[in-house]
Each structure stands twice: as C-alpha cells, then as structure tokens.
Amino acid sequence: MTDHVPPLARTAVIVVAAGSGTRLAAGAPKAFVPLAGRTILQHALDGVFAAAPAQVILVVPAGREAEAAAMADGRPVRVVAGGDTRQQSVAAGVAALADDVDTVLVHDAARALTPPAQFAAVADAVAPGVGVIPALPVVDTLKRVHDGVVVAPVERAELAAAQTPQGFPRAELEAAYAQAAERGVEYTDDAALFAAAGGAVHHVLGSDEAFKITTPHDLERARMIIDNASVPALGQARRPVAGAVVPRIGIGTDVHAFAGGGTLRLAGLDWPGEPALEGHSDGDAVAHAIVDALLGAAGLGDIGQHFGTAHPEYAGAHGDVFLARTAEILAEAGYAIGNVSVQFQGNRPRFSARRDEAQRVLSAALGGAPVAVSATTTDGLGFPGRGEGIAVTAVALVHPIAHG
C-alpha cells in the first residue's frame, strides 16, 4: 500500500464505512472488524492516504464517530454519521465536502487493499459530465437462470465487475444526489445514480487487490495478502519474487488426550477398537500438527486462526479436509509444499503395519506432496507413556513458486 502517486489536488475521498457486515458475521460493523492486527478501516485508510487527497471523509455508523476518528491514527479526517442505506450514507459524505473540492471519489472501506494508484487513475479520468469507475473483465462463464433452470448463456465480453473508488465531478454529483432524494429512488451504486441524472460513466482498469471483503473467506484472503506483504522473500506485488525459491521451514506440534469412547482418527485413518482423541474436529493430531507446520513455514498464521472454534463449519471435520484447505491456502499465497515429516509419540495404536497407507492418504490430501510418518514410544515416560494421549511433532518445508 505504499505505491508512489502524485497528490490528488482538489480531490476528496469519501470512505463509506457504515455497513453492518451481516454476511461477514464477525459481531461488529464490517469496517471495524480486525484484520491482521488492525481493522479493515485502518487498512483502507492506508491506501487512501497514500493517494494524498485534499480531503478524507469517513462515513460510519452513528455512535461510532469517535472510534473511527481514532482509527485514522492521527491523520486528518472528517467523520460523519451514515444513514440507513448506502445512498443516504454517501449523501452525508457529500454534504461534508470542503469548499475547494471539485472532484469526489466514493470508496468502500470493505475494499481495504485497493492500491493508491487506483485512486489516481480514477481521479485523472474524471471530466465535466463524466464519472469514472474502476472495473475488471468478467472471466467466468455466465448463465441466465430461472427457477433453478439455465435458460441462456450471457455474453461476458460486454460485462465488467465494478470496483471503487468511483469518481465524479463534484457539482454534478451533488445535483445527482439532490435529484435522487427528490425522486425517492435508491440506486445500487453511485455510478448508477450519476447515470440516472444524465451523466456519462466511463471505466478504467481495476485491480485484483481491490476485492470487496464480504464473507469470512474474503477476510482470510485479505489476511494472507497482508501477511505475504510482510515476508522479506516476497515482492512489491505481494507475490513471490520471480526466481526466488529459497525454502522455508515450519514446525507444528499437537497434543490430544484420549476421550475414552468412539473410534480413533489418526494420520488420516480410522483405527477401529482404539479410543478416539478429544478435539474440536476429529482430533487427528497428526493432521493438525502438519497444518501448523505448513502454515508456520509460509508465515500464514496457525491452525486456530484458520480452523478454530471461530470457524464452526470445521467442527467435526476430518483432518484431510484441514490438509486440503491448507494446501489451497499456501497455493493462493504463492507457496508450494516441498515435503513433510511427522512423528507421533504414544503407546497406541500399533502403527508400522499401516504406515504406507497413512502416508498415501496424507500425501493425497496435500495434493501429492511427500509425507513421511514415524511413531515412537516414550518408554513409559510422560502422558504418552502412561497411555493418556498422543503428542505429535511435524516439520514442513515449503518454497515460493518462482515466476518468469
């Protein structure tokens, strides 16, 4: 978020942060949800201020103005309370514009990783009678459906996915908002409102990083991008440096007590006749230790962050689900798995006869990465020696995927 761009003279950015964040289900308005040690709003403001606009206006839920002002971290902002709808919230921001502003950018705080250059590109393209949106081409195959039945294909060449900030000449945006209020019409975004008032809307190329944080998966994606940006081996584009394949090593441990009932799940296998291990999911301590080792090697957090009790969708899930998702997380972050070595300590189960089977299952869950599993006892020492549970240590090697 440190791209160098010229200051946006006579330009204001209205940051809309008044959404409830219902789909994110994080227990707070979306912009106030934690993301990599800060809030979504704070990350959004980093990009906004790096673009150096003449004025920044925050529109936040009523009653949270002081909290939002503190999130500016001492940078100059004007904070206003939003309304019941997005359109009402933006209108409150428009009403707070400084007298010397003649270009207005309206930006969703939920697009927290938007590059500063995107603000500059939009502002530069705004002209009298012309509003501007950043947009990306639609790459998915699209279908029109009715009552669950596909009725026709949709030509995607004519479609684009809109992002923010959306930019407008100030006087015409104010007139468009006044007209919408007079007519009592609500629009899906500012570009639609501007167009309804007779303005033309053009577009510039958007950015993959300007995605909107709407769901828990989006939040995880943003967290991974931020984590990757802090890794020295990664480049300015938050991807591995081309040709840089220096391996990284991680260690994971896990400990579970025997629950006394059920069937043991360990190393990706069921062990009939052996008592189950206690745990949030299936208690597969081998799989869980591998997950921690892989995430730690890539600098992507730990198992609790991605699969813990805050993620009820993983309650009761088998370890191979965790492993497969972890492999996806690493791939999305630009890492390939080299190999994994794991050892568990315990008096039971008797492992050697099923070693090859376990290694095949674990490797398959990781997309074919080599996995070696060994087992040992502790000669009666400690809780594993007393038969109270199992302790596991895993070591994983990953490396950035070279590009170019």
Image: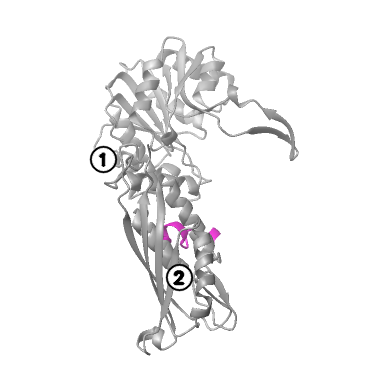
Neighbour tally class for label 1: few under 14, some 14-19, many 20 plus, Cα within 10 Å: few
Q: Is residue 215 left or right of residue 96?
A: right
Residue 156 percent location from the top left of the image: 60, 26
Q: Is residue 150 left or right of residue 312?
A: right
Query: Quick one: 264 or 90, which is closer to the camera?
Result: 264
Query: Quick one: 96 or 278, which is closer to the camera?
Result: 278
Its colouring scheme is one colour
Q: Is residue 342 in sight in this rendering? A: yes
Amino acid type shown at disc 1: Asp
- Look at the image and give the residue range highlighted in magenta: 303-314
Mark sitting earlier along the chain (2/1) = 1
Q: Quadrant of residue 169?
A: top left
Q: Which residue is mark 1?
A: 73
Q: Find the residue positioned furthest to the top.
A: 128
Label ID, residue 336: none
Residue shown at 33%/50% (left/top)? 37
Amino acid type shown at disc 2: Val
Residue shown at 59%/23% (left/top)? 157
Label ID, residue 286: 2
Determine the main secondary structure of the stretch shown in magenta.
helix
User: Above or below — where is 285 with respect to 332?
Assistant: below
Neighbour tally class for label 2: few under 14, some 14-19, many 20 plus, Cα within 10 Å: many
Query: Quick one: 241 or 17, which is closer to the camera?
Result: 241
Q: Find the residue positioned furthest to the left.
A: 74
What secondary structure is found at the residue carrying circle 1? loop
